Image (cartoon, helix red, strand yellow):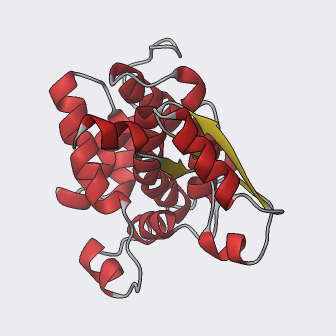
Amino acid sequence: MPQALRLRFVSLSGPSFAKEVAANHPTAVVSASADRDASRTVQSELSFDNFRIYTNDDVVGTELGGSVKNVMAIAAGMVAGLGFGSNSIAALITRGLAEMTRLALREGAKLETLMGLAGLGDLVLTCTGSLSRNRFVGEELGKGRRLDEITAGMNAVAEGVKTTLAVKRLSARIGVDMPITNEVHAVLYEGKLASHAANELMTRPLRGESN
């Protein structure tokens, strides 16, 4: 992509189920671009009463947050499908955010982006919302259904299924530890049971929270 176009690229991302936006539910997202004028143009043109757009200049963090959260939503769905409760979901979201942050920072993102709408905000929505396609896939996997059977019955795409492949490859290439991503990959593509994946995560060697 020519440099001039790369600078004017704008990423619009954040916690926003389209159905709720269309129903005028208050929603806030991020317009990210290396070109401040471009991000502000999107902000001014697309914002309205119940749709608030903030700006930042961190395209990498915004894009990675919007991608990796889908992998974590599949994991959160598996936790729910296995019958576990709020403690488990909260732990998954928190440790999932740690994984997202490690990867994004290594790729040059800003910490505040991962703590904001395009990171934590989108992660919480996708991991807990009933409209989340990725969480639905995870729930069904947790109940023991096969991936091909689940996706065959869907009329929309769960982006996290293929994103898991990309995230696992990227994390392996740059040497970032992403245990949740690895277990989601094992369930999706290696035939591992969701219950075994959950047990694998809970029996990993104990360590400090910041590690």
Tell me what residue is drawn at x 57 percent, y 61 percent: 83
Outermost residue, right side: 49
In the drawing, does residue 163 fall left or right of residue 133?
A: left
Residue 88 seen in the current view: no
Residue 10 % position (x, y): 46, 47
Residue in the foreground of this view, choosing between 135 and 41: 41
In the drawing, does residue 68 fall left or right of residue 46?
A: left
Establish if 176 lies above or below 56. Answer: above
Residue 155 % position (x, y): 40, 86
Establish if 157 lies above or below 123. Answer: below
Establish if 188 lies above or below 71. Answer: below
Tell me what residue is drawn at x 43 percent, y 63 percent: 138
Residue 50 seen in the current view: yes
In the drawing, does residue 202 fall left or right of residue 32?
A: left
- Kindly indicate the quadrant of the structure image that contains residue 126: bottom right
Quadrant of the frame with the C terminus: top left
Residue 27 % position (x, y): 74, 58
Quadrant of the frame with the N terminus: top left
Tell me what residue is drawn at x 40 percent, y 28 percent: 104
Residue 115 % position (x, y): 62, 30
Tell me what residue is drawn at x 46 percent, y 59 percent: 78
In the drawing, does residue 190 fall left or right of residue 177?
A: left
- Kindly indicate the quadrant of the structure image that contains residue 145: bottom left
